[in-house]
Image (spheres, rainbow, N blue to C red):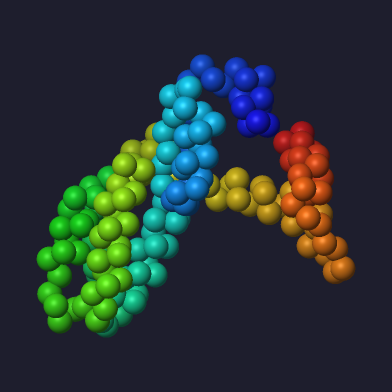
Amino acid sequence: MLLSTFLLVNNLFSRELVFLTDGAQDLRSHIQSVFQFHPYMVILDWFHLKKRCQEWLSIAIRRKDRRNAILEKVLRYLWADDVTNASEHLSSLDSADIKNRKWLDDLLRYFEKKGDAITCYALRAKLGLRNSSNPVEKANDLSVAGRQKHNGMTCSSNRSRAPAALQMICLNH
């Protein structure tokens, strides 16, 4: 509700909305339910995509040097929005490189499931567009944690909203 009001007041409904997310299905469902009346795009945050690849390949692939080479190639494909070649590269790995097939298969399913939210991060970077939600996450951390993460302070989520909103207004001048 607050986001819709902000977008309306600042005349931002005149363009397609872009949401950078960590890939959580509940976020995507919420975006769909709130903004189904307006054009929008959901992009999988590069930081979270890269982190997922690093973590799962670390479990799936033998030998650090081999894992790093595979990771580098997969990330190059994903940076250019080439999910197909990233998946094909992982699917064609020599079985001697694989220590845990389950994690590799899970990563391939993740690409399949999230593929429509993976974009050409290289083009976005060249155009000066964001590829990560880090600035928003940091702003949230500054607005909430700065007020509530002191010794002896606790606050329910209902009681956190107002101070967080006020702090965000201050941070945004």
Q: Quadrant of residue 1?
A: top right
Instruction: Compare residues 161 and 57 and report the one nearer the observer.
Output: 161
Look at the picture and state if 114 lies above or below 127.
Answer: below
Q: Residue 65: in sight, yes or no?
A: no
Q: Quadrant of residue 149?
A: bottom right
Q: Residue 15: in sight, yes or no?
A: yes
Instruction: Compare residues 2 and 170 and report the one nearer the observer.
Output: 2
Q: Position of residue 107 (x, y in %)?
A: 30, 63
Give the tally of numbered discs.
Answer: 0
Look at the picture and state if 33 lies above or below 120.
Answer: above
Look at the picture and state if 7 lies above or below 121.
Answer: above
Q: Position of residue 46 (x, y in %)?
A: 41, 51
Q: Quadrant of residue 16?
A: top left
Question: Which residue shows up at 48% across the image and 22% down it?
Answer: 37
Instruction: Compare residues 72 and 81 and report the one nearer the observer.
Output: 81
**Image-based side of 10 in relation to 94, left or right:** right
**Image-based side of 16 in relation to 59, left or right:** right
Question: Which residue shows up at 34% across the image and 77% down it?
Answer: 59
Instruction: Compare residues 51 and 127 and report the one nearer the observer.
Output: 51
Q: Most extreme residue toward the right, as rendered?
A: 152
Q: Position of residue 6 (x, y in %)?
A: 66, 26
Q: Position of residue 173 (x, y in %)?
A: 77, 34
**Image-based side of 99 in relation to 134, left or right:** left
Question: Which residue shows up at 15% across the image and 58% down it?
Answer: 88
Question: Which residue shows up at 51% across the image and 45% down it?
Answer: 27
